[in-house]
Structures are given as C-alpha cells and as structure tokens.
Amino acid sequence: MDAPPPPAAAAHDCPELPRRGLMFILSSPSGAGKTTMARRLLEAEENLAMSVSVTSRPVRPGEVEGRDYWFTDRERFMAMEREGAFLEWAEVFGNLYGTPLAEIAEGLREGRDFLFDVDWQGAQQLSQRAGADVVSVFLLPPSIEALEARLRTRATDSHAVIAARMARARDEIGHWDAYDYVVVNEVVDHCFQQVRTVLAAERLRRQRQTGLIDFARTLMR
C-alpha cells in the first residue's frame, strides 16, 4: 500500500521572507478619527510602532519623554533642522514638530514599520524625502456637519478654537488627492478594516520583499 501523502504545511510553517519596513502615514482633519485609528492599529499590529516626533511645545500632564514626544525648546529644534536631523517638520498652532531621520532609517533597514500621525504638509515632505518607503492614507469625515459635531462633543475646546479647527479642516480636506489612499470614516470598525487591509497589502509589495529573489531561486532549482 502506498504511503499517505504528507500533511499540508500549516499556515504558520510558511517562510517569513525578509522585507524592508514601511512608513505608514495617517492624516485627517481634527475630529475625523485619526487618533482612534492609530491607536487601534498599534494594538492590532505587532510590527508597527508610532514614530516619536520631536516637538517644541510644553509637556502636557501624563505625557512621557520618548514615548509621546521628544521635548525640546524652539531654539534647539531649529538647530536640529539646520543639521538635517528631520525627515520632515512643520509648525502647527505655534508649535514645531519634526520626525527624526536616524531612527527611522535604521528601523526600515531592519524591516520595522512606523506609523506617522502628520498633516498634509508632513505627508508631502515625507513622500518627497522617503519616496517608495511611504504609504499615505487620508481619512475623510462622512460630512462637514458630522466633523463639527465630533469636535463639539469633545467639550474640551472653546468656540473660537473649534472655529479655527474647522477652518483648518476645510483646508486639509482640499489636499485629499495628494494621498495614496482615501477612506471615509463613517463607521469606525469598517474604516479600521479598510485601513488595515491597505497596510497588509503594502507589506506584500514585491519591491519591499528583499528576500523574495533568493526564495524564488530556491523554488526553481
């Protein structure tokens, strides 16, 4: 009697090929769900870390140096910018924010993925500096009325601040076409699944799988 065929390899037996990491950008107007989406991605994805920015703004209660931001003063920040220490930087509501270059470059080589919470200017700068390493997603609210309602529901900002944020939101929405992907955040769970699908697909891009050539050659022997 012929021996039975060997069992099919389990899914976890499939080889994990070396790959280059990616820079995953999430942008949205204030109140459109970017923070919620980022938090859920970080909870669900093991190989995804938040890029820690350098900022000139004061530390807020509960924030931790090196976890939330790297805190510095405006003078030192601008000195770092002149030294080429940032992949991108921008001024938002009077405060400076920048992405440190050295940490990201090392992580990408090691196959680590980074999540970026930046506005359209930061996304543009990152795309110009990092090119193929960048994947950008822009979240849109289902309506401008829904966006304003979300901001007012927070009950943390004054009417003047909300008005300023709405004006800025309209400007940011005008840059939606600069992104690789655009997702309307009407139902949070559905939006999350769409964003996570984008991340999974981009990790499989042939150009990022640095071990693919050698693996394919072993199959052809």
Image (tube, rainbow, N blue to C red):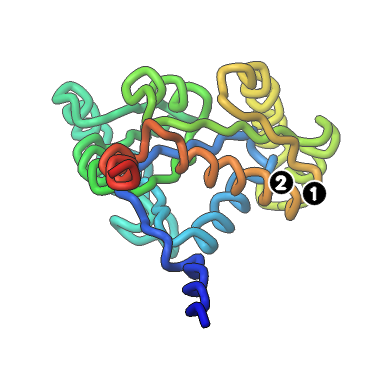
Quarter where residue 158 is shown: top right
Circle 1 sits on which residue? 187
Quarter where residue 180 is shown: top right
Which residue is at a point 74% across and 51% down the rendered structure image? Answer: 188
Callout 1 environment at 10 Å: few (<14), some (14 to 19), or many (20+)?
few
Q: Look at the numbered discs 1 and 2 and tell me whether their residues touch, using CB distance below 8 Å.
A: yes
Callout 2 environment at 10 Å: few (<14), some (14 to 19), or many (20+)?
some
Query: Eyeballing the image, is 128 above or below 136?
Result: above
Query: Eyeballing the image, is 167 above or below 105?
Result: above
Residue 33 horizontal/vertical position (percent): 67, 45
Residue 54 seen by the camera: no
Compared across the picture, whether 35 is left or right of 128 comes to: right
**Residue type beneath disc 2:** Cys
Compared across the picture, whether 187 is left or right of 160 comes to: right
Q: Nearer the viewer, residue 141 or 170?
A: 141
Please tell me the numbered disc located at residue 191. Answer: 2
Which residue is at a point 54% across and 62% down the rendered structure image? Answer: 44
Quarter where residue 94 is shown: top left
Which residue is at a point 35% across and 58% down the rendered structure image? Answer: 67
> The C terminus appears in which quarter of the rendering?
top left
Compared across the picture, whether 20 is left or right of 194 comes to: left
Which residue is at a point 47% across and 68% down the rendered structure image? Answer: 9
Residue 198 seen by the camera: yes
Judged from the image, the secondary structure of the residue bearing numbered disc 2 is helix
